[in-house]
Image (cartoon, grey):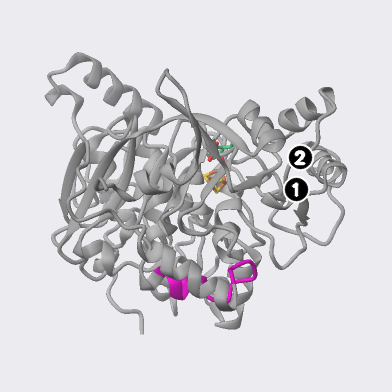
Amino acid sequence: MTVKTLYEKVWQSHVVKDYDDGTSLLYIDRHLVQEISSPQAFSGLTAQNRQLVRPAAHIAVADHAVPTRNRNMPLAEGLASRLVGRLIENCEQFGIDYISMTDDRHGIVHVIGPELGFTLPGATLVCGDSHTSTHGAFGTISFGIGASECECVFATQTLRQRKQKTMRVTLNGALQPGVSVKDIILALIARIGTNGGVGYAIEYTGPAMATLSMEARMTLCNMSIEAGSRVGMVAPDETTFAYLEGRPLSPEGEAWDAAVAHWRDLGSDPDAVFDAEVELDVSGLAPHVSWGTNPGETSPVSDRVPDPATETDSAKRAKIERSLAYMDLKPGMPLEDIAIDHVFIGSCTNGRLEDMRSAAEVIKGRRIAPTVTAIAVPGSAGVRLQAEAEGLDRVFTDAGFEWRGSGCSMCVAVNDDRLKPGERCASTSNRNFEGRQGQGGRTHLMSPAMAAAAAIAGHLIDVRKLGSSN
Ligand SMILES: CC(C)[C@H](C(=O)O)[C@@H](O)C(=O)O
Ligand code: SF4
């Protein structure tokens, strides 16, 4: 028996057929469906008069376009009502479980998959959404697919794919207080670049990794795609099993015991060889913020805005110049001098309970700066309800935040939550592309604690400088 990595084990157990060109037909266990990427796939099925081979393998939810306010009101005519209406019709026609906006299971696809126990170790899971890498935190091969691939999964429950190379990212040391997994992934992307992971399935491992909660692991795997990697994975361990036990769709009784026994064997063999190795010591890591227009344009918050004049590579220099022009930043200014207008705490990267807790801890007993508008948007109704049970909603609203209903919201500005041209936002989301949070809007990516600190200070600031509020 040859030694294998986690990725190779899960891959091999799903191969239906290997082709001569190096691709394989993979069995796909599960498929999450959202309103933006599915209409074309459903139309394709209808046009060819095809049915789903396994309707129970799919769950649908509208997360991108739905409003985060007034959720009990009918949707006003517009994009959201068209997209949601179409998804409901399609789910009825094809027999898919549709989770409505007012359902307690509602949320961003990548938040509810794990919450429901739909995401399981050793499985293959796809979604027409690039942040499907999130689910790899469970030792799942999960990746984003295009509309025609969604159609293929609906009709055949298989996909023809090329196996990725493997990259091991070893996280050494231990995080200091005030520093979080978001800082790890931002630092990693700054180091390897937004193309550094292209063609690789990343496995995160190492002493710092082992101590991370499932929610933190999801944040890590979520942003693998921002390093160019479609797949990010973590080997299942006791933390994974404890998270999944008792979830609505998790196996039960003897099936649970058998599943755990299988999942324990999924970890990479000790002698397994990876195509690429990256090591990161997280001990001295400072909180990071992005200053540019891709997630790799990120620095420790104590740094200054880079000066393009010091960059010798002309293409890189031009990119920095363009980023600074769009972001309206001056070379050499301290990052902490950047004043912000908005704060967004949410998204499939950092809209989970621990994120809400960590932001609430910073703002408790404080008020947001008078120049700032701030929203906290739980990634799911489950997160919202649990946060409310802990009184976190009051912590946010007492500080001047708005507390909203679940969805993608200001991460992508497909609904009404968006920046106006020229506005600047401290955001816990994953993408800072031009116009991402609204046309002409400017995004600085950071952790929930750092975004909370920015809300209080009115500008970017190292959360560790704020000290304790009470
Ligand atoms: C709308 C969707 C297809 C898109 C994605 O693929 O990721 C969105 O979720 C995003 O984050 O940009
Ligand atoms: S929260 Fe943002 S990144 Fe995640 S699925 Fe929604 S739009 Fe995409």
Which residue ends up furthest to the top in the rendered image? 314
Ligand 1 picture quarter: top right
The circle drawn on residue 120 is none
Q: Nearer the viewer, residue 373 or 55?
A: 55
Q: Residue at x 77, y 57 (%)?
A: 100
Q: Quadrant of residue 230?
A: top left
Which span is picked out in magenta? 240-251
Residue located beneath label 1 in the image: 55
**Crowdedness near tag 2: few (<14), some (14–19) or many (≥20) residues, C-alpha within 10 Å:** some
- Say left or right for 52 vs 418: right
Q: Nearer the viewer, residue 356 or 440?
A: 356
Residue located beneath label 2 in the image: 52
Q: Classify 219 as above or below 416.
A: below
Q: Classify 403 as above or below 319.
A: below
For badge 1, the amino acid type reads Pro
Q: Residue at x 54, y 57 (%)?
A: 119
